[in-house]
Amino acid sequence: LSARGHWSTWPAFASGQTVPRSPKPCRAPEERPPGNKQVLRTIPKPRYLERLESYLRKELQSLDLTKKNSQELKLQPYREIFEFFIDNFKTYKPLLSAIKNEYEVTLAHQKKTIRALEPLKAMITTMSEECTQKILALQEKERDEINMLKQEKQHLLKFIDNMKEEKSSLQVQVERLRTSVAEEYARYLNEYGARKMLLAKLNDMYNERLDRTRHQVQDVKGEDAVKLTLALKIARQDLTKAQVKLNAMIADYGDVVPRRDFESLEKKYSDLLQEMKTLQRDFDQLHKEYETLQEIHRETAEERDNFRAKLQQAQRNRTPRPNWAKCSEVIPGGAARWGCLAEGKTSDQLVDVLLEEIGTGVLKEINVFPGWGKGDTVPVYLRHDGEVKNKKLTKKDVVNILKDVWKEKIALEQQVWKRSSLPEFFLGYLQKKYGDAAAMEWSYTLYKNMRLCRSNHVLSSFYDVLTGKVGEEQYHGQNQLVSNLQKDLAACDSSNSGSLTREQFRQEADAVREAFPLKRKESIQELVDASRYRLDSTEDLIDYVSLFKEDEEGNAEPFVAKLRSQYVRERREYLRELRSKLGDLTEVKADDLKTAFCTIDPDIDDQTLDTYVGLAYQVRREQPDQDVVPTETALERLLAGDVRRAGPSPGERST
């Protein structure tokens, strides 16, 4: 402070410096000092500041900064200097005191926190050391186990080698024994033949001896009767012994067959047994196929009865077919535009087209829309009080805006890796592009056009996702389906010209079948027929890229339209099979739902199964499953999501 009690004008940065004195602007140029010479003045430092700095230097020099609490000791001189400063400035003392007290309280709180964390630091250090020791112990233990397993592996390899060698030696022995047995068998056969020949020879010799004896008896008359009696007795004894031996041999070998016959019968038995096993396997396979065909026949009969009932009901309720050509007289654009709109559509679809054209004309005559209010039941993009101006957009403008919304949303989700809500993003997009004031006008106009034009895929799909009727996954799933098929067809085009030759186009059915292996033959043929509806028989090259084009109103070609309709139909058939498998259950548990999915779709993986169950129960995969949920509610939720078959059905797999 100066002597008069005011702030000192000395600048803090001007210590020991000189400040140039600027000349007065009113002086004439000739009165100014010549050249670059300027008048310099020296600004002295305030005496009180010099005393404070001197006191601070002395205090800091007197401190022992080697101690543990050197930082706290170093802070004390600065605290005293700040207190002197506060005491001398009376006007700012309350504010400076409050600042000082707040810093003191903060420092005390930080010290308290540090003291509380010091035991935790020591504990963490101890735990880190313990964990390190445990890891080292586990590594040492695993190293011993690995060495032990390696030794066991080497031992087993040696044992396997020994077994192989033993097997080889045994095979050699078996071959040697087989050779020996064959030789013995041949020797026994030779001995058997020699024995038979010897017996025949002995019999001949015996008969010759009998004849010779008989002749001798006849020649020698008057021989001793006693001697003849004794010879007869001995002959009878020999005959008895021979008879006994013959009976014993007949008894012992009466049931024995020759070895050749035995081996022949054994071989014939083995062949018959193998043939019987083959026939049994064929019979089991035919039986399974027969049961499968019976099941298919039963399902076909039921389907035939249902179609017959529907046909009879349709025949009873049918009305004369209207003359749709009359509509060309009232539709803007005349017969040419009506022909484009009505091409390939059924009567029900033509009614929708006619209603859209009438509704679009009425919508353009409306200038304002009544607001729906700001209640919680009103969608966020329609919350408005009062009237809203009608922008009177064309269908082309609506299609371009909705495509741009999808494009911006997909780009944002790829950046943040998080899916956002379509209603909120839709409102934010309109506010960002047209401003908060006009956002509701665009929102109401787009909503009315989407709700009215149900035959246009771009408008109807955006409307269904926006209102929550279906999940956003269905829209992306259909687009991915079309994109994959387009890539498969482009892969057949080696020249990248966008066209295929007639021979390549004949193979289109195979390409479609490879892209959609789960589709039936009828569905594949429908797609092929839809792709050829504009095919000229005189053209050599076929433009397959045109199959995926859209007109300015977002209407796709019949090929893509048929592909999308099959996508919806196959999902509904899949869920009908699931409903049939659940039977008469009014409430379904998570386990029952998983069992039904696995029964009708055996190839479904666990991740997809958990996703479908979570969709039915409106819970995430990591959350616990609910006990039960109404069956119809679960099926409605599955119908809104992207639920598709993962593999062929059991019936198709067996056939």
Image (spheres, helix red, strand yellow):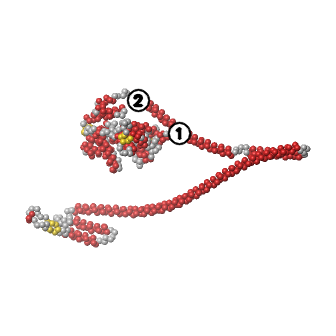
Q: CA distance from mark 1 to mark 2?
A: 38 Å
Pointers 1 and 2 in contact (CB under 8 A)?
no
Q: Position of residue 463 (x, y in %)?
A: 33, 40
Of residues 313 and 269, the one drawn nearer to the viewer in this rendering: 269
Q: Amino acid at mark 1?
A: Lys
The one nearer the camera, 37 or 61, is: 37
Q: Residues within 10 Å of mark 2 (few under 14, many from 20)?
A: few
**1 vs 2, front mark:** 1
Q: Position of residue 140 (x, y in %)?
A: 48, 62
Q: Secondary structure at mark 2?
A: helix
Identify which amino acid the numbered label 2 is placed on. Answer: Ala
Q: Give the numbered dot on residue 367.
A: none
Where residue 442 sits, quadrant-wise, is: top left
Q: Position of residue 293 (x, y in %)?
A: 50, 36
The answer to which quarter of the image holds residue 403 is top left
Image quarter (top left, top right, bottom left or bottom right) of the N terminus: bottom left
**Nearest to N terminus: mark 1 or mark 2:** 1
* In the displayed structure image, the side of residue 40 where residue 635 appears, left or right: right
Residue at the (29%, 45%) spot, across then down: 429
Q: Residue at x 37, y 40 (%)?
A: 541
The residue that mark 2 highlights is 314
Vertical placement of 39 versus 358: above or below? below
Give left or right: position of 258 versus 71.
Answer: right
**Residue 181, position as x, y percentages in the image:** 67, 51
Q: Is residue 374 visible?
A: no
SS for tag 1? helix
Please give the count of numbered marks on the rendered protein.
2
> Mark 1 highlights which residue?
288
Is residue 612 visible to us here?
A: yes
